[in-house]
Amino acid sequence: MSEPERAAGLAYERAGDGPPLVLIHGLGATREIWRPQIGLLAGERDVIAVDMPGFGASPVLEEPATPWALGGAIAGLCDELGIDRPHLAGNSLGGWVALEMAKSGRAASACLISPAGLWRRPLGARRIDARAWARRLRPLVLGLTRLKPAREAMLRTSLGLPERAPAAVGRSLIEAWIDSPGYEAANAEMRRYVCEDLDRVTVPTTIVWGELDRLVAPPRPERRPPGSRYLQFERLGHTPNWDDPELVARLLLEASSAAAPAAATISGPEGK
């Protein structure tokens, strides 16, 4: 992972020029999930990839790590950088955080990749805590990541096509998931609530879902922000950054463009 810059207590990486686009990772991840897209976006956007509080190089929150508290921390980063209403892109929990920022007037647009929070009722506690076991067996688990079949099996929950992620990247993703100090608190808060007041999301919003998503089901129409655009692709997973880097970058550019349609529902085979 490259050495980050810091503002408002958060670690971030910034590249490119153009309208600001803030990239928000999901639960157990870091800003590194956007590595395949940053270079593809930097020619047209001022890209800010941030480590949410408690993940990567950012410290944990002192308050409960609710999606709106995480969004408030990122809004504080934007304030310090002199950015009022950036375009936002978020994956999983990061998508919910982007929604909370949009509801509070801190977004120009939102691109939500497999967003959390659009379920109909709170998830409640997990029956089996795989991460707790991985933490207990950390040396063994990280040792197994050097074996391609084991590594890809571990990644298949989040990556639709884990064989496309370089070995070093795969090991780094698994290590970040195991070691995130803010994971338990953010996971507990995420599973305690649903994203409410979706009618307050008035900016252009795109929801992207991959049919290889093994973590969360796509949101029903009534659980999407009014007027949002819904796109579904066959060969993308829950965190699709390595499944099809160019497609994901193109979607982020389209979603953060003034030309993005306000509403549509599209299902297609792109990403094969």
Image (cartoon, rainbow, N blue to C red):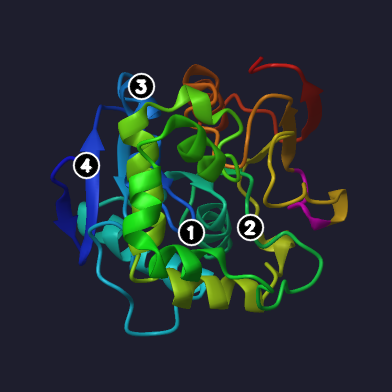
Disc 3 from disc 4: Cα separation: 23 Å
Q: Secondary structure at mark 1?
A: loop
Q: Amino acid at mark 4?
A: Met
Tag 1 residue: 27
> Looking at the image, is mark 4 or mark 1 earlier in the sequence?
4
Disc 1 from disc 2: Cα separation: 10 Å
Tag 4 residue: 1
Q: Which residue occupies 33% across, 68% down?
A: 54
> Looking at the image, is mark 2 or mark 4 earlier in the sequence?
4
Tag 2 residue: 116
Placement of 99 over or under 108, stated as above or below: below
Disc 2 from disc 3: Cα separation: 28 Å
Query: Are the residues at dot 1 and dot 2 in contact (C-beta closer than 8 Å)?
Result: yes
> Looking at the image, is mark 1 or mark 3 earlier in the sequence?
1
Q: Identify which residue, 31 or 15, lies in the foreground.
A: 31
Q: Amino acid at mark 2?
A: Ala
Query: Are the residues at dot 1 and dot 3 in contact (C-beta closer than 8 Å)?
Result: no
> Looking at the image, is mark 2 or mark 3 earlier in the sequence?
3
Q: Nearer the viewer, mark 1 or mark 3?
A: 1
Tag 3 residue: 44
The quadrant holding residue 15 is: top left
Residue 225 is covered by the magenta coloring: yes
Q: Residues within 10 Å of mark 3 (few under 14, many from 20)?
A: some
Query: Magenta region's main secondary structure?
Result: loop
> Looking at the image, is mark 1 or mark 2 earlier in the sequence?
1
Q: Residues within 10 Å of mark 1 (few under 14, many from 20)?
A: many
Q: Which residue occupies 48% across, 59% down?
A: 27
